[in-house]
Amino acid sequence: MKATEFQPPSSVRVSATRALKNARHLQKIAPHVMPRKEPTGGFGSIIPIRILAQLHRPDRRAALMRNPRLAAMIGPSEFPESGNTAVDALFSGVLSFAHILFTIQDQNNAVLEVSSADVQTAIDYALKASVPISEYATQYGPNSIGVSSDPIDFAVTLPTALYNDAQLQGWVNQFVSDNGLPSNACVVILNPTSIVNTDADPAQGIGGYHGLANVPYCFVNTFGQNLTIDDRGNLYAQVLSHEIAEMAVDPRVDGQNPEVCDACGPNCQTVYLDYFDERGAYMQTSQALPPAFAYSFFINAIVQPASATTCPAPGSACAYSPSPLFMAWKGVQDDQGIWFSTDFGGGWAPQENVAGIGTSFRPALASYNFFDSFTETTQIHMAWKGIEGDQGIWFIKFDGNPQQQVPGVGTSVGPSLAVYNDLLYMAWKGVVGDQGIWFTTYDGSTWAPQQNIPGIGTSVGPSLAVFNGLLYMVWKGIEGDQGIWFSSFDGNNWAPQQNIAGVGTSVGPALAAYDGLLNMVWKGIEGDQGIWFSTFDGNNWAPQENIAGIGTSVGPSLAVYEDLLYMAWKGIEGDQGIWFSTFDGNSWAPQQNIAGVGSSVGPALLPAFPLPAIGQSAASRTRREPEKTDLMMAK
């Protein structure tokens, strides 16, 4: 890592993972300094942990080597330094909490432990925290973090209330063997305040570390009792989340993959903490604990890859949402390629091309959860009409597999997607000459036969969104009819179509459920490039409003992201730029241009987890209980 040494205050719980990596490296290359058998007093009894933690850093080595004793001990030894990206695979498995009962012989065989209630609180916290941790870690590669909901007792006997990491590794291996845990398990150990792991002495400000025995493990010092999930006293959660996150990205602990929390603190600077509400929705990132606002839980911030080797990382690389806003679009004019970008709240990333696919219209996006055994897998799905002359509908899961054609269907415009009742719904206008509206469903493996929705039609294509337990669809009328129509679906039947009085469009509307209302935006009728807006409360549509100062020749898209309604659109005739704005429930923010991108049609938006896995396997997540996620997307 770069920059200067950070001296954390004594109250901060730093991670000893890098120090132990460097100590084990010395065991290999300089056993005369660091013996193969770890000293009872831990590696820090030979070289202080604070020094060990810096030996791999070129910017610190010169200063450290001014100490003649240290220079004589390790000489010109080289230490591996990880880069910004992962080389080894990330963790994909289940956390199992060991409830260790320590019998201390020199204390009259007293049994010391973290209470069962506190271990269960830590498990309940991990069930919540593992979701955003996995989301953040997806920036480094596919991963899956499950959490076993039941702790397992494990008894050890010690002559004194001291032990080291070598002993801990033996316990981890025995724990795995005794309980028949799989090879993809990770054991979590909570250490009571009355016992000292000499490789992670809390008196030296060490909170914990992660390592690798026969399986990965996370060691966490606790700093008090009667733990709570919100942990306003910083007794365990910052350390536990730090070690889970770094283990998830670097389960082999071999120096190949980055340490993804250190740069955001506490090792390199005052720690950044990501705060979440009771729903698990990201609120904000702060260096204050407790913050001035109510929250449900927090995790140690995870650095963005570009800053993974910078110590300290800039605040913008630590303070961001775990789930980006994802945008995909057809290119300009004769460019039928599909492009995408992401925004974590700090700006849109450079555009990337989705190789080997193309469209003459706009793609549709959905984030669809499906279950394989007990694993909930979430993948971004994209569907689109083929290139000019190809009326087939194609889709991709962004799981590293190639595009597939939806059999037996076609469109002259392009489809719309939404998730409803655990199925992925797709609706579209028919092929050239067919103004009917068709729909089908996808269960994660198979598309159902298409069905026509009788008695309705469009010259452009519909949009879908879920609201108040129903699947809503809106569309422009058939050729010559610029009215906007809507219907709802209850899982069995489509309600009769209804016209929305007093509004019209030449292209078609977009939908999203936001702030307790169904929100609709659309381009005006022929000759009107303004963008208009209305809301539906389940009974009535509010009078239309013009969004002042903006315009489009095609029509906008909508998505809800971080408690705001986002809208993106292609510019007016002659302007192929892509623009966006946000709505907070009261007013629209000034439009902003997304630099360096363009489209002849316009974009689609999606609040995205996981990140699209272009050329790699998609990430997945495991929860104790399934979570349904309504899609808010517009074609």
Image: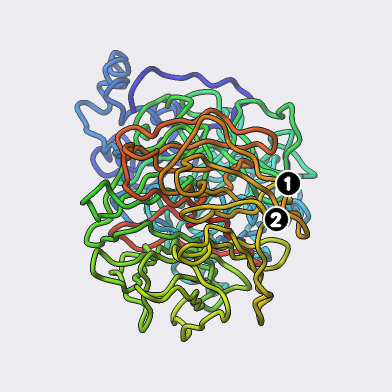
Do we see residue 537 in this rendering? yes
* Location of residue 239 with respect to 248 vertically, above or below: above
Residue 212 located left or right of residue 285: left
Name the residue rendered at 47%, 39% in the picture: 344
- Residue 91, image x, y percentages: 43, 58
Residue 363 located left or right of residue 587: left
Pick the front one: 314 or 392 = 392
Q: Secondary structure at mark 2?
A: helix
Residue 62 occupies quadrant: top left
Instruction: Look at the image and name its color scheme.
Output: rainbow
Q: Residues within 10 Å of mark 2 (few under 14, many from 20)?
A: some
- The answer to whether the residue labelled 1 contacts the one labelled 2, judged by CB atoms less than 8 Å apart, is yes
N-terminal label among 1 and 2:
2
For the residues labelled 1 and 2, the Cα–Cα distance comes to 7 Å
Pick the front one: 42 or 345 = 345
Name the residue rendered at 67%, 66% in the picture: 498
Mark drawn on residue 120:
none
- Residue 57, image x, y percentages: 31, 27
Residue type (three-letter) at the residue carrying disc 2: Asp
Check disc 1 and report the residue beneath it.
229
Pick the front one: 139 or 417 = 417
Do we see residue 113 in this rendering? no
Q: Secondary structure at mark 1?
A: loop
* Location of residue 254 with respect to 266 vertically, above or below: below
Residue extending furthest front?
A: 480
- Residue 310, image x, y percentages: 36, 27
For the N terminus, which image quadrant?
top left
Check disc 2 and report the residue beneath it.
124
Counting the numbered discs, the total is 2
Q: Residues within 10 Å of mark 1 (few under 14, many from 20)?
A: some
- Residue 63, image x, y percentages: 31, 15
Residue type (three-letter) at the residue carrying disc 1: Ile
